Amino acid sequence: MDLNLLCFLLLGVLLTGYAILDGFDLGVGIIYLFAGSDDDRRTLLNSIGPLWDGNEVWLVTFGGALFAAFPRGYATVLSGFYMIIVLILVALVFRAVSIEFRGKHISTIWRSFFDSTFFLGSALATWLFGFAVGNSMMGVPLTADGEIIAEYTDLIRPFPILVGFFAMSLFALHGAIYAYLKTEGALQKRIHGWIRRASLVFLVLFVATTLFAVIRVPSATHNFRAMPWAWGIVALDLLAVGSIPIMVHNVRARCAFAASSCSIAALVTLFLFSVYPNLVVSSIDPAWNLTIYTAAASEHTLEIITVFACIGMPFVLAYTFIVYWVFRGKVKLGKESY
């Protein structure tokens, strides 16, 4: 059994789970300011209130698994993308503080301030995730010693910037569909209009990002020559993306949410497929790439990780299912609501 590949697939599962689950509550934050009244904004906050912190556990687990299975890759990513990671953490912290503190004081200025920080934290974190993905696909100046020697300004390139905005459009659409499922009445009708506009922006950025990747990013397609079966993932992604507007038009929100979730899963899979077998791609010399073999921990460590993953993942999935089942249904504001 190839334990290195198995651990890489485990990282893929964790990253996909995080993107789907935290993607919709980050998306709710991106569309949040479109809700004008205080009750509407409280409804959106309470739609993710019981779930958002649990969703972020998937990101923490992903970081822990990366450190345990591929410590050299973890060290390189953490040092090379240090400022990006710090900004993501700051954005997520401000976002969490905004959720918890907004309702602590009845003041227009107080609530407007935390409304703004909730939106900015959600939008900035999402954009930075996409920005990091774009740079990972293009490659970074990685030396033979596993050190990224680029200045932060060197990472500001058109493709990562585009991927950042594409990620925002994807999560905004995903979050709007989720919010539609959790609301009712006049707010739900307005959200249906938001979904239509978000779908249009998403489709435009999807086409632009795909064309840019195919034309200007060689790593996006080079693995397809050796593994042509991966075109099936592309087909599934296109099917999911194409079905979202149809489901929205027919007001089949559950199917639209399933389609957006499948699209996110396919996009994360395609991202990992584009860099495989690398964890960090060197733009200086391909021989200096950090792969899942050169950056891995010892075989014994990988065996232990595999055992814990086999034992722990069913509990994680069961817990996630139970939480979502308990808090299913429409949002009702009450005394204990945000």
Image (tube, helix red, strand yellow):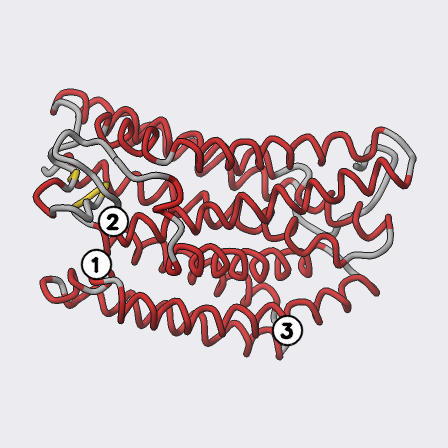
The C terminus is located in which quarter? Answer: top right
Lower position in the chain sequence, tag 3 or tag 1: 3
The x, y position of residue 177, in whole percent, is 62, 61
Q: Vertical placement of 253 versus 161: above or below?
A: below
Q: Are marks 1 and 2 in contact (CB under 8 Å)?
A: yes
Lower position in the chain sequence, tag 1 or tag 2: 2
Residue at image point 71% right, 35% down: 98
Q: Marks 1 and 2, how far apart in space?
A: 9 Å
Kindly state the secondary structure of the residue where label 1 is placed: helix
Q: Marks 3 and 1, how far apart in space?
A: 33 Å
Amino acid type, callout 1 = Ser
The x, y position of residue 71, in whole percent, is 24, 25
Kindly state the secondary structure of the residue where label 2 is placed: loop
**Viewer-side residue, 47 vs 190:** 190
Query: Given this view, does label 2 or label 3 mark the residue nearer the observer?
Result: 2
Amino acid type, callout 2 = Gly
Return the residue at label 2.
Answer: 139
**Residue 334 in which image quadrant:** top right
Query: Given this view, does label 3 or label 1 mark the residue nearer the observer?
Result: 1
Disc number placed over residue 219 in the picture, else none = 1
**Viewer-side residue, 134 vs 229:** 134
Q: Are marks 2 and 3 in contact (CB under 8 Å)?
A: no
Return the residue at label 3.
Answer: 196
Q: Vertical placement of 49 versus 250: above or below?
A: above
Q: Marks 2 and 3, how far apart in space?
A: 35 Å
Residue at image point 73% right, 49% down: 44
Query: Given this view, does label 1 or label 2 mark the residue nearer the observer?
Result: 2
